[in-house]
Image: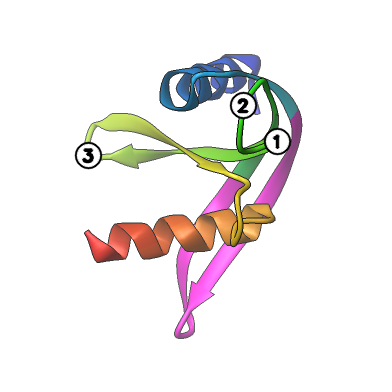
Amino acid sequence: MQPKEITELKDAIRETHGCESLHVESVPVKEVFEGQTAWEGTVEVFDLVGHEKAKRAYTWSYRDGDQNKSIAVLEIPPVDSPQSAVKVAIASKARK
């Protein structure tokens, strides 16, 4: 991922969760539901600095109409990996 996008995701973490972060790695994820691809992309993994409940966040960007949006999911059970972060985000969006 480009440095600009990493900076944008770090900004999203700061705005959403009120802490700084350090980029750790990029993980490709493909989430399949009932034989169909529900989501496919790269999840960026960040270590959090000074967050009271989580040590790590999983983030990614997506298009919503003509806007770029970001999701930052904290590593709090049941979230323990990039894959589980995507599953939780999909389930949360489905409930809305």
Say left or right for 17 vs 23.
Answer: left
Q: Secondary structure at mark 3?
A: loop
The residue labelled by disc 1 is 55
Residue type, numbered disc 3: Gly
Asked if residue 11 is positioned above or below residue 53 in the image, the reply reads above
The residue labelled by disc 3 is 65
Question: Which residue is located at x 22 percent, y 59 percent?
Answer: 96
Rate crowding at label 1 as few (under 14), some (14 to 19) or many (20 or more) other CA atoms within 10 Å. some
Residue 32 in percent (x, y) is at 52, 74
Q: Secondary structure at mark 1?
A: loop
Q: Is residue 40 magenta?
A: yes
The residue labelled by disc 2 is 51
Residue 70 in percent (x, y) is at 42, 33
Residue type, numbered disc 2: His
- The residue segment tinted magenta is 24-42
Residue type, numbered disc 1: Lys
Question: Which residue is located at x 36 percent, y 33 percent?
Answer: 69
Q: Distance from label 3 to label 2 (Cα)?
A: 32 Å
Q: Observer-nearest residue: 50 or 56?
A: 50
Rate crowding at label 2 as few (under 14), some (14 to 19) or many (20 or more) other CA atoms within 10 Å. some
Q: Can the viewer see residue 29?
A: no
Asked if residue 53 is positioned above or below residue 31 in the image, the reply reads above
Rate crowding at label 3 as few (under 14), some (14 to 19) or many (20 or more) other CA atoms within 10 Å. few
Q: Can the viewer see residue 23?
A: yes
Q: Of callouts 3 and 1, which one flags the residue occurring earlier in the amino acid sequence?
A: 1
Asked if residue 45 is positioned above or below residue 8 in the image, the reply reads below
Q: Observer-nearest residue: 36 or 24?
A: 24
